[in-house]
Amino acid sequence: MRSRIDEEKRTMEAMVRLYCRRKEGNKELCDDCKAVMEYANKRLSACRFGERKPTCRLCTVHCYRPDMRRHVSEIMRYAGPRMMLHHPMMAIRHILREIIKGKKVKR
């Protein structure tokens, strides 16, 4: 069984690859997308919540630099809706986590 952080890294990688391939038209990851993915992996590895990590959108601590946060937001806005077609299990798992964590946060 994978750890929560490893799953988040895999989901982020899938989103970055989808964005780079479909939106930017690259066959391989461009340098900018590689940098975003490396940065995201580093931040996820250092997440203070560890296995209790909420989805980034619901997190109370925003650990990305402002420039990276903007770039990741752009990637997620593009890739997020398309994940259901390309990686349905990842998308469903992510949506369920948001619903479950969202209810816990609202209490």
Image (cartoon, rainbow, N blue to C red):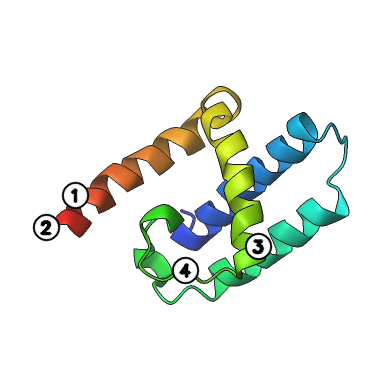
Q: Secondary structure at mark 4?
A: loop
Judge from the rendering whether residue 104 lies leftward or rightward of residue 38; answer left or right. Answer: left
Q: Which mark is residue 87?
A: none
Q: Are marks 3 and 1 in contact (CB under 8 Å)?
A: no
- CA–CA distance in space, label 3 to label 1: 28 Å
Query: Considering only vertical position in the picture, is 104 above or below 46?
Result: above
Q: Which residue: 17% across, 55% down?
A: 106
The first of marks 2 and 3 along the sequence is 3
Q: Which mark is residue 68?
A: 3
Q: Residues within 10 Å of mark 2 (few under 14, many from 20)?
A: few
Q: List x then y, in percent, for residue 22.
A: 75, 29
Q: Amino acid at mark 2?
A: Arg
The first of marks 4 and 1 along the sequence is 4
Q: Mark 2 against mark 3, which lies toward the viewer?
A: 3
Q: Which residue: 51% across, 52% down?
A: 7
Q: Are marks 2 and 3 in contact (CB under 8 Å)?
A: no
Q: Are marks 2 and 1 in contact (CB under 8 Å)?
A: yes
Q: Are marks 4 and 1 in contact (CB under 8 Å)?
A: no
Residue carrying label 2? 107
Q: Secondary structure at mark 1?
A: helix
Q: Residues within 10 Å of mark 1 (few under 14, many from 20)?
A: few
Q: Amino acid at mark 1?
A: Lys
Q: Mark 3 against mark 1, which lies toward the viewer?
A: 3
Q: Report which quarter residue 23 is drawn in.
A: top right
Let me know if residue 104 appears in the view.
yes
Q: Are marks 4 and 3 in contact (CB under 8 Å)?
A: no
Q: Amino acid at mark 4?
A: His
The first of marks 3 and 1 along the sequence is 3
Residue carrying label 1? 103
Query: Considering only vertical position in the picture, is 42 above or below 6?
Result: below
Residue carrying label 4? 62
Q: Secondary structure at mark 3?
A: helix
